[in-house]
Image (tube, grey):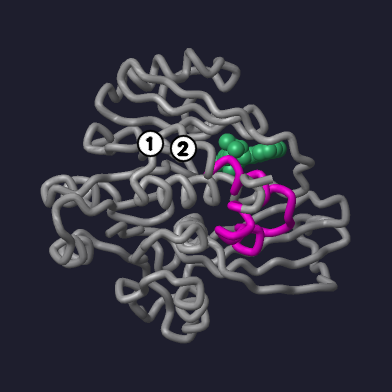
Amino acid sequence: MLYNFGSINLDHVYRVPHLVRPGETLASHEHRVGLGGKGANQSLALARAGGEVCHWGQINGQDGWVRDMLVDAGVGVTGVTDVEGPTGHAIIQVDDAAENAILLFPGANHGFRRADLAALIDATAPGDWLLIQNETSALGDAIVLAHQAGMRIAFNPAPMSDAVLDLPLEHCDLLFVNRGEAAWLAGLDQAADAPALLDALAQRLPQTQTVLTLGADGAWFQHGQTRHFQPALPVKAVDTTAAGDTFIGYYLAALQDGAQAPACLILATAAAAIGVQRQGAAASIPSRAEVDASLAG
Ligand code: ADP
C-alpha cells in the first residue's frame, strides 16, 4: 500500500482587476473554492492513474466535502481526521493579466505531532510506501519512524525550504525534485545544468533514486551509475500548476504496477503534458483513460 502524508488545502481563488495594494480594499468579481494542496493533488493524481493510495491528513470537521471529493476519486480516507482548527487554505488572487498572489495558511496541515505519525505508521506493513511533501509538520518524525518500520519513503520537498536540509534524507528511497528544489538541495546555482545537479545529488544521497523534472525540458531518473532521460512532450502549456503533482502521482502508480523507471517516466510525462494544457490544479489532472489514449496516439 502507498500512504500519502500530505497537505489538504482549500484554494479560494478570487478574480481581481489588479492584485490588491497595501492599504487598499478591493472588490473581487468572482470567487471559487476548490480542493488544493500538494498532498491532496498527488493523492488525486495517484488515484486517477489507477494507483492505490491512502491519504493521511487533517481537516476541519465543517469541510467534509473535501473528504467526499477524495473518496469520489478513489483515494482512501481513513487516515483523514477531523480537527477543531481551520483546514489549511490559500487565498489566491488572479488578475486580468493572469498574474497571481497567494496567501497560504497551513492550518490543520501543521497540526501533526510525532504521536500522530507513530499511530499511523504503526498500522502499516514493512515495504509499504510513504509519500511526503513539504507542506505538513513533523516531517523529520515521519521519516525516522517510517524508516524504523521498514517503509519505503518517497519525498517531494516542495515547496522547498531550508528546514528540508536538516531532514534525514538518507532514509528516502525516492526523491522527486524540480530544478529549483534540486539546486537548493545540492547547494548549486539555479542555472546549473542537469548533469551537474544529478552529480551533486548522487554525491549527497548515493542510495536514493532521484527523479529530476525540468518543466518543458523533460525529466531525468538517476540511481547509482544509472541515468535515464525522458523529453517532455511538445505541447502548448496554458497553466503548469500541479504539473509536478500530476507527474509524481502517475510515476508512483506505474511503480506500483511493477514498471521500471523508463516506463514510469513515459507515463508521468504523458500525464503531465495533458495537465499543462488545462487550467487549474486538481481539475487539470487527467484520467488514466485520457493518458492511455494519448500514449496510444
Ligand atoms: P513542478 O511543477 O514541480 O515545478 P516541472 O515544472 O518540472 O515540475 O514539471 C513536471 C513535469 O511536467 C515535467 O517533467 C514535464 O514532463 C511536464 N511539463 C511541465 N511543463 C511542461 C511544458 N511546458 N510542456 C510539456 N510538459 C511540461
Q: Please provide percent x and percent y for residue 248.
A: 47, 46
Question: Label 2's element?
Answer: helix
The residue closer to the viewer here, 171 or 297, is 297
The residue closer to the viewer here, 85 or 76, is 76
Instruction: Specify the farthest residue to the front.
Output: 296
Q: Residue at x 48, y 30 (%)?
A: 212
Answer above or below: position of 81 versus 296: below
Q: Residue at x 88, y 61 (%)?
A: 17
Point out the image quarter for the C terminus: top right
**Amino acid tagged 1:** Gln
**Amino acid tagged 2:** Ala
- Mark 1, Cα crowd under 10 Å, few <14 / some 14-19 / many 20+, is few
Asked if the stretch drawn in magenta spans residue 167, the answer is no
**Res. 134 in view:** no
**Res. 217 in view:** yes
**Where does label 2 land, which residue?**
263
Q: Residue at x 45, y 45 (%)?
A: 251
In what quadrant does ligand 1 lie?
Answer: top right
> In 3D space, how far apart are the residues under numbered discs 2 and 1 (Cα atoms)?
6 Å
Q: Which residues are magenta?
A: 268-292
Q: Which mark is residue 260?
A: 1
Proximity of marks 2 and 1: CB atoms separated by less than 8 Å: yes
Q: Residue 11: which quarter of the image?
A: bottom right
- The answer to whether the residue bearing label 2 lies less than 8 angstroms from the nearest atom of ligand 1 is no
